[in-house]
Structure formats: structure tokens, C-alpha cells
Image: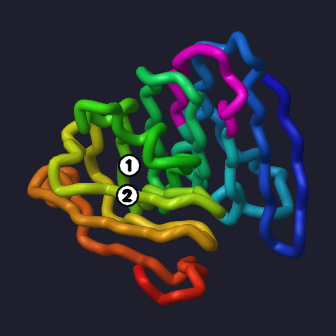
Amino acid sequence: YGVAFTTSGATQTVTVTAKTTDTAIDLSSLVGSASSATSVAASTFSVDAGANASSIAITGMAAAKNTIEGSATSGDVLTGGGKADTFVVDSDALLFDASNVMQDTYVGGAGTDTLKLNATASAVTVVAADDFSKASTMESITTAGNTGAISLTLGATAETAGFTKIDLSGDDEATGAN
């Protein structure tokens, strides 16, 4: 996989881009250098496997925030670290299959972990029958700025997964119908 490092003031972003053939990326054993001028804890590790042609297992950096996007194929196992992690899903079709079963496994870990529905110009619909049983230690659902309609009706499995907050501040739908 490829790695790019950018810095802005006291924070850094390390971007890891999966190759289309990668089946696993494990950042959990990375540690910050004692001679580093800035703390790894102030960094965000961003892993993007959106172009990956097969399912992938991604484990985030333990001592930093992670932003993790799985593949477009079902069967990913996505695990955060010890800080506030964000799991990005580009559409509700990538989140649940036609039988309302979660396509991938999401493990938030410590910190307040967020599932971000990243569709920006299409409707997002989550129904009460959608089964969140493949998610654990997740606390929040949010949306990207979206001009499409957003409809979220969460069932009991969402509560069992740990979800306690829904943030629709990214809602850009002009009619206010959400």
C-alpha cells in the first residue's frame, strides 16, 4: 500500500491508500518516535480501500484517530484504535445488502467512534429492519453534506451495537424534508 504524510500546524494526516489487490492493512503496531516533534496522538491515520477489488481487513493505528474506508466488496473487517475513529461508507447499498444484513464488520474500539454515510448527491435510507449486528463499540452515525434525502430509522440492533447519537448537521437537502 502507499503512504502519504501531510502536516498542518500541530496536526498531521497520514494517508494509506490500499492497492487493488491488498487483503490486509494493519497499523496497530505502529508507534510514535520518541524524537518526533509532534505527538502521534494528534495525528489522523486515513486508510482508503475504496478502489480495492476484494474484501480487506483494516486495523487502525492504536494511539491515533483513524478514518477508515473499506472496499466496495462485502466482507471487510474494519477495526479502529484507541481514539475517536470514523468509518466511511459511500452509500447505504455498501452498508446493507438486499436482505438488510450489514455487508462489513465494524469494530470501533475505545473513544467515540462514528459511522459516516458519505453519499453527497443521492438518497440515503436506513430502515429499522437493517441489522447492525456486525458493528460493535460504535457510538455515532453522521452524514456528509448531502443534497439527497436522508432517512434514518434505527432498530434495536443499532442500540446493541452502541449507537447513541445521530448527527445530521451535514444535511444539505434543500426542501428540509429530512
Left or right: 68, with 161 as reference point? right
CA separation in Å, label 2 and label 1: 22 Å
Left or right: 149, with 33 as reference point? left
Looking at the image, residue 161 lies above or below residue 133: below
Q: What secondary structure do most residues of the magenta stretch adopt?
A: loop
Please, what secondary structure does the residue beneath circle 2 have? strand
Q: Residue at x 58, y 26 (%)?
A: 26
Name the spot of residue 87 as percent of width and height, x first. 51, 50
Residue segment shown in magenta: 48-59
Please identify, in this view, whether the residue under mark 2 or under mark 1 is nearer the observer.
Answer: 2
Residue 52 part of the magenta segment? yes
Q: Residue at x 56, y 80 (%)?
A: 173
Name the spot of residue 174 as percent of width and height, x first. 59, 86
Which quarter of the rendering shows the N terminus?
top right
Q: Residue at x 44, y 60 (%)?
A: 114
Left or right: 158, with 71 as reference point? left
Please, what secondary structure does the residue beneath circle 1 have? loop
Q: Counting residues from the N terminus, which is met first, the one under dot 2 or under dot 1?
A: 1
Q: Dot 1 corresponds to which residue? A: 108
- Count of residue discs: 2
Say which amino acid is labelled 2: Thr
Q: On the image, which quarter does residue 60 sit in?
A: top right
Q: Dot 2 corresponds to which residue? A: 125
Q: On the image, which quarter does residue 50 sit in?
A: top right
Classed neighbour count for the residue bearing mark 2: other residues with Cα under 10 Å, few (<14), some (14–19), many (≥20) = some
